[in-house]
Amino acid sequence: MTNATPLLLKIKPASAGLLVRLEDGSDMLAASGQAVPATSYYRRRLMDGDVVELTTEEVKALDASIAAFENGGVTRDSTPAEVPQEPATPKNK
């Protein structure tokens, strides 16, 4: 029996600020991680050290964001909304 290659890899760039192009050239790999097909392109990125596999905690977070996206709750790049703050103005005394 041979080892089966997983259908998807859950990877992220190996270091902050590193841009890794998606195989089809349409965009860059999400800094927080992304599920991608287990093609030779992504396996080479792993072997070259350009990307790393996500940790268990990162996979859980990615799976939760994928589920939310599929349910129409968020976009791929969305982050928790922050309430805009008005800049503090100095008060005359």
Image (cartoon, rainbow, N blue to C red):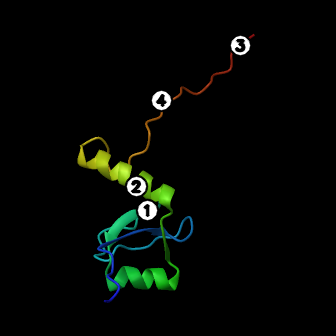
Sequence-first disc among 1 and 4: 1
In the displayed image of the protein, which residue is found farthest to the front?
A: 1
Question: Which mark is in front, 1 or 2?
Answer: 2
- Amino acid carrying label 4: it is Val
Marks 1 and 2 in Cβ contact (< 8 Å): yes
User: Where 77 falls versus 38 (above or below)?
Assistant: above
Marks 1 and 3 in Cβ contact (< 8 Å): no
Residue at horizontal 75%, vertical 10%? 93
Out of 7 and 86, give the one closest to the viewer: 7
| Residue at mark 2 | 62
Q: Secondary structure at mark 3?
A: loop
| Residue at mark 4 | 83
Question: Which mark is in front, 2 or 4?
Answer: 2
Sequence-first disc among 3 and 2: 2
Image check: 52 left or right of 21? right
Sequence-first disc among 2 and 4: 2
Question: Which mark is in front, 3 or 2?
Answer: 2
Local crowd size for mark 3, using a 10 Å CA cut-off: few (<14), some (14–19), many (≥20): few
| Residue at mark 1 | 33
User: Where 5 falls versus 77 (above or below)?
Assistant: below
Sequence-first disc among 1 and 3: 1
| Residue at mark 3 | 92
